[in-house]
Image (cartoon, grey):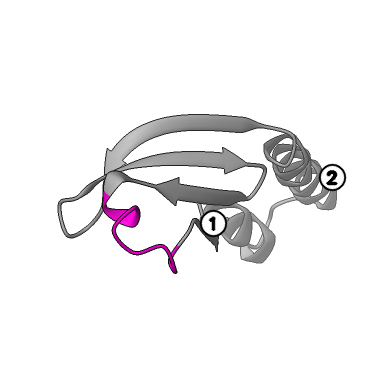
Amino acid sequence: MNRLREVMTTEGVSIGEQYRRLMEAYQIELEYGRTMASYKGKLDDGREANFLRLAGYRWLTGPWMAKRPDTGCRAEGMGSR
């Protein structure tokens, strides 16, 4: 997004180039919305967790959640990538 912002505000960049970059960013976002991935990782506090990302959302689970049945899985928006 920073590169796109820079191109859109830089003098001398043609309208055609700005449009091409905008469409490229849009295409990347569309593709990202159709992907999924799963992986193991660590949370900021050091606990291990299983992550599942579907489109722009991720869910996380871990053995520490079993101790607190009220937590379940958390869905978080990915925000800026």
Within 10 Å of disc 1 (Cα), the crowding (few <14, some 14-19, many 20+) is few
Label whose residue precedes the other's in the sequence (1 or 2): 2
Q: Quarter holding the N terminus?
A: bottom right
Q: Is residue 2 magenta?
A: no
Q: Is residue 9 left or right of residue 63?
A: right
Determine the residue positioned at 51% across, 39% down. 52
Quarter of the view holding residue 7: bottom right
Which residue is farthest left? 46
Q: Is residue 27 above or below residue 6?
A: above
**Magenta-highlighted residues:** 64-71
Residue holding disc 2: 16
- Given residues 69 and 61, the one toward you in this image is 69
Determine the residue positioned at 40% across, 47% down. 61
- Given residues 19 and 54, the one toward you in this image is 54
Which is in the foreground here, disc 1 or disc 2? 1
Residue 81's x, y, as percent? Answer: 50, 51
Q: Is residue 65 left or right of residue 32?
A: left
Within 10 Å of disc 2 (Cα), the crowding (few <14, some 14-19, many 20+) is few
Q: Is residue 69 magenta?
A: yes
